[in-house]
Amino acid sequence: MGITLNPTPIKAGEDILRCTLVQKGLGENMKVKKAVILAAGFGSRMLPATKAVPKEMLTIVDKPSIQYIVEELADSGITDILIVLSRGKGAVQEHFDRHPELEAALSCKSQKLYDELLQTAKIADITYIRQPIMRGSGSAVLLAKGFAGDEPIAVVYPDDIMVSTSVGCRGNVPSTAQGCHHNILISENSPTACGSTNYETPTTLQGCQDGAEVDGGETPPTSQGCHPNNAGVGVYKKPVTMQICEAYEKYGLGAVAMKEFPAAEITKYSSLDAKLLENNLYRITDMIEKPAPEQIFTNFSILGRCVLPPKIFPILEQTKPGLGGEIWLTDAMKRLANEDGMTGVDFDGVRFDTGNKLGLMKAVTEIALAHREIGAEYRNYLKDLPI
């Protein structure tokens, strides 16, 4: 497979030569349509709640946490999702499946709940695979080799719930309900507003119809798109996964979501050798997991989302077991960064680590405050607490 390096002209003020990798079958025109969610972990930080209930099924207001992940992927243009599970996690598969008996009961009682139930089963094409023995994140990603084929694939850690703060929408991206997520604060007087029970209504820029009034009557410009994300939080915001996909499609290189941490905390995460390209995009040439203080490149660390080229699979197959005798995705990405370089996206958004108790409660609080049905009452409740 031939590879050509095409230099991109340096903009005024830039001190880094930016090269775009163009590879047959890849490159900036290769759209990211597939994703794998790594959901096989024990959830030991959330015991005893996760002894019998998968951590991905722990509820954030009225949806399990993994549904927020799947919705984010669908709203980012991902059409095919593989979820890696382990023993005892059949509830995840059941959640995204049809439930004819419940649907029949709801059809007579609540049209709204009936529509929501049907929509949950239609968010995306989801398949499942079981990881028989948990031998690290790299081992889990390798299970997606046949699923990915020769296409790029987004890799998602479901503990990380991302709430967007970036405005924008890529055209032709179908969102969760052909318009908006459920419970977005939208004027009920607007006949073309998202959030109605008619989820099949085609939308402008696959967000909301022109003239849809949101949050007190504010009408978003159509050119901005209108991606309402995560049950009302980040209305009209670009999902974090979409930001990473766009970086991959622009440069044709593996791309990662990243954030800067305080120097005292970076040793708990990874450290990236990252140099500014433009705006919030960085060129990554090296990385290290849980560095010692003298090994720190920068205070940027990978968080929960990345898009990887097909090349990652042969690299993973050659990656030797590391810490704990497991195969780690970071070790394979380190080689990818060394050989080809990667793109880092200092993403616009807020991340909640729902794999620990405090992170889960923060996510519940933030999303509940923006929830259409309970937001106002919940806010008043919090104000009245004797804190």
Image (spheres, helix red, strand yellow):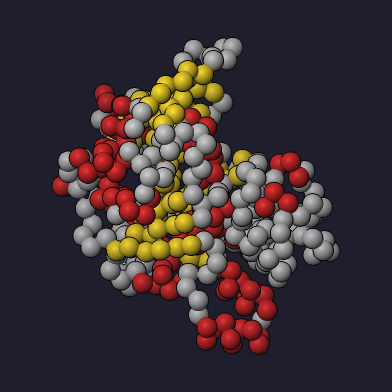
Number of disc labels = 0
Q: What residue do we see at 52% from left, 70% from top?
A: 121
Q: What residue do we see at 26% from left, 41% from top?
A: 314
Give the x, y percent position of residue 67.
50, 62
Q: Residue 250: in sight, yes or no?
A: yes
Q: Nearer the viewer, residue 245 or 95?
A: 245
Give the x, y percent position of residue 381.
63, 64
Q: Residue 42: in sight, yes or no?
A: no
Give the x, y percent position of residue 12.
59, 12
Please identify the quadrant where the C terminus is shown: bottom right
**Left or right side of 267 for 304:** right
**Left or right side of 250 for 84:** left
Give the x, y percent position of residue 100.
52, 83
Q: In this view, does 90 lie above or below 265?
A: below
Quarter-of-image position of residue 143: bottom left
Quarter-of-image position of residue 94: bottom left
Q: What residue do we see at 63% from left, 49% from top?
A: 172
